[in-house]
Image (cartoon, rainbow, N blue to C red):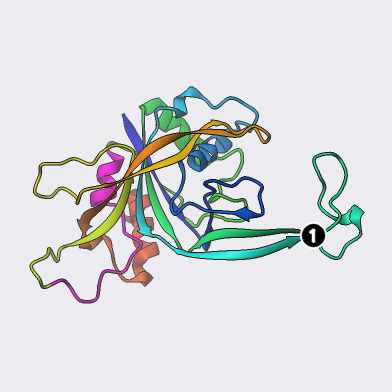
Amino acid sequence: MSGLLLRLAGPLQSWGERSAFTPVRDTAPFPTRSALIGMFAAAEGIGRNEAIPSRYHDLRLTVRVDRPGVRLTDYHTAGGGFPKDRTPATSGGSNKGAAVITRRHYLADAVFVVAVTAPDETVERLAHALTRPHWAPYLGRRACVPDEPFLLRPHVTDPEEELRTRVPLSRTPPRTPHTDGQDTETITVEFLTEHPPPTGEPADPAPADVIDVNDVPVSFAPHGRTHTGRRIHRTQVPVPRSLAGPPHTLLQRLIAYAHPEESA
């Protein structure tokens, strides 16, 4: 088992959780398993009507929340003020007679780093596809383009340990270190894991919140999307303060991490 690391950052992200094509298009507060597997499948050229490959079933996903982002809502219309034949089409082959109104929810300025753990052959296949994708990846919706670097590392031995100890943090460290006996050499960061965090060690994270979500894809078929549930664990984990830094150094630190051979 090994893994790869993705950095999901951009002006806007939207990770649909409960809505499909409804007047209100919601977003989860973090990347969903369905969206990430859909991203991998698209990169490999697997269409929506094709079966989801079994190799995706055993992927283990861990999300580090560098910045949760700010929620915003876009009041969106399509087709208003036009003749019927120039309004949005319907599934029955006709056209809607009036404007389509939706309220679309986004996360602005959010940053997530995802550790993907899988068998070595799956990691190699995914890394190749994400480097040369069949269909371009996006952050939940096609209009949400990811920043670079997107694929931070195509192969690491222990991607979750990399999240905790080495991947640059897209966050400015607190201006005033804690002086009430707390560790000033670490910063507390939220992690979302698909397995319970370890317990029993002095440096272990705080007790986790357990969240039940319905985002495990069974089918991506446009008229038959189905999902099942999973349980994730949300906890606060101390990471080295050195992973954070001034905003003007972030891109340089990310490039140095993503391409260590060029910065050596």
Residue 111: give x, y in percent of width and height: 42, 58
In the rendered structure, the answer to whether residue 178 lies left or right of residue 144 reads left
Q: Closer to the camera, 14 or 259?
A: 14
Outermost residue, bottom side: 176
User: Which image quadrant: the N terminus?
Assistant: top left
Residue in the picture at 36% in, 62% down:
170
Residue in the picture at 23% in, 51% down:
165
Secondary structure of the residue carrying tag 1 is loop
Query: Which portion, as a residue range, is magenta?
Result: 158-178
Say if 166 sits above or below 108 in the image: above
Say if 50 sits above or below 138 in the image: above
Say if 54 sits above or below 22 in the image: above
In the rendered structure, the answer to whether residue 184 lies left or right of residue 77 reads left
In the rendered structure, the answer to whether residue 85 lies left or right of residue 175 reads right
Residue 146 lies in the magenta stretch: no
Q: As shown in the figure, which amino acid type bears the numbered disc 1? A: Ala
Snapshot quadrant of residue 263:
bottom left
Residue 148: give x, y in percent of width and height: 48, 56
Say if 195 sits above or below 143 in the image: above
User: Which image quadrant: the C terminus?
Assistant: bottom left
Which residue is the site of mark 1?
A: 99
Residue in the picture at 84% in, 55% down:
87
Residue 173: give x, y in percent of width and height: 26, 69
User: Counting other residues with Cα less than 10 Å from the Cα at mark 1, is it few (<14), some (14-19), or many (20 or more)?
Assistant: some
Q: Closer to the camera, 172 or 24?
A: 24
Can see residue 154? no
